[in-house]
Image (spheres, rainbow, N blue to C red):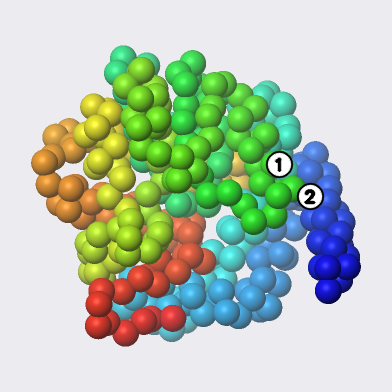
Amino acid sequence: MRLFKHMLCGLSNVLSRLVLGLVRGLGRLPLPVVRGVGVLMGWLLFVLAFPRRHVVLVNLRLCFPAWTLAQRWSVALQTFVYFSQSWLDRGWLWEAPATVLEQRLRRVGNWQALDQPGPVIIFSPHFYGLDAAALAVSLRTARQCTTIYTPQRNLLVDAWAARGRQRFGDVQLMTRFDGVKTIVSLLRKDGLLFLLPDMNFGPEESIFVPFFGVPTATVPSLSRFARMGRARVIPLLARMTPQGYDMEILEPWAHFPTDDVVADTAFMNLRLQSWIETMPAQYFWVHKRFKTRPAGDAGFY
């Protein structure tokens, strides 16, 4: 049995190296070629990954009940395309020189807000351009940047991701298990925290607040870190375009956080809804956002 497991592990490593080699090789080609391969990959995943397609369709039904079935299927197909394109884009995001990134990562909005003194939390929701947004920040600022991430199960992919995310600026990667005190300490030293709290991490770490009108387990970390770190919250939206990505810095939130963490978290979800409505296919619908339910409620998936 041990020998069999060892052989499977070896085959997995070989396959991982092959896939990473292909992605990194694609990253050297013109962007339209990368995006074209992403379209084909997205269509293939849409057909073959039917359990995940079901998750996307359920999410869209819950969030956009007025849409027709045809609308939901159309956006579901497009979200698989964006998912695939963004994954392949990491071949150049994490490998290409800074000159290439500066050509493809277009900064719009109030980027000067990052230059003002004081701790900053960048609220960057799970749109498919989130890794492009993080690199645009680390290329732009001299601040120490901290980001909380979920390690990949595949160690080769995890190591590649860590190298790619840390190759510019002063970036420290932390998991959500590394402790709040360290993160708050870095924030209070005029640091910058790149935070993506719009995920479902289970009932132990979440509170239920509305998201598209559905009670949704939501991590209240944005309000809590902002309060403990005495930090301004600045939203950053990443939009995929044919030329690369548009990264828009919005105005810092006034009167945030308050003393009411539930109200703050509900406000966060409400603002996120308004952004999703402008580019619904680019949100991370492949995640089981509504998996955790209030006690007694039936599951959706």
Which quarter of the figure has residue 221?
top left
Name the quadrant of the C terminus.
bottom left
**x, y percent for residue 241:** 56, 46
Residue at the extreme left of the image, as rendered? 259
The image's mark for residue 160 is: 1
Question: Residue 240, percent across and down?
Answer: 54, 48
Between 50 and 246, which is closer to the camera in this rendering?
50
Q: Position of residue 94 (x, y in %)?
A: 68, 37
Toward the front, the furthest residue is: 2
Q: Nearer the viewer, residue 176 or 75?
A: 176
Quadrant location of the N terminus? bottom right
Q: Nearer the viewer, residue 202 or 83?
A: 202
- Give the labeled residue for mark 2: 20
* Coordinates of residue 248 in the picture (x, y in percent): 41, 36
Q: Residue at x 66, y 66 (%)?
A: 42
Q: Secondary structure at mark 2?
A: helix
Please state if 100 lies on the left or on the right of 200 as rendered: right
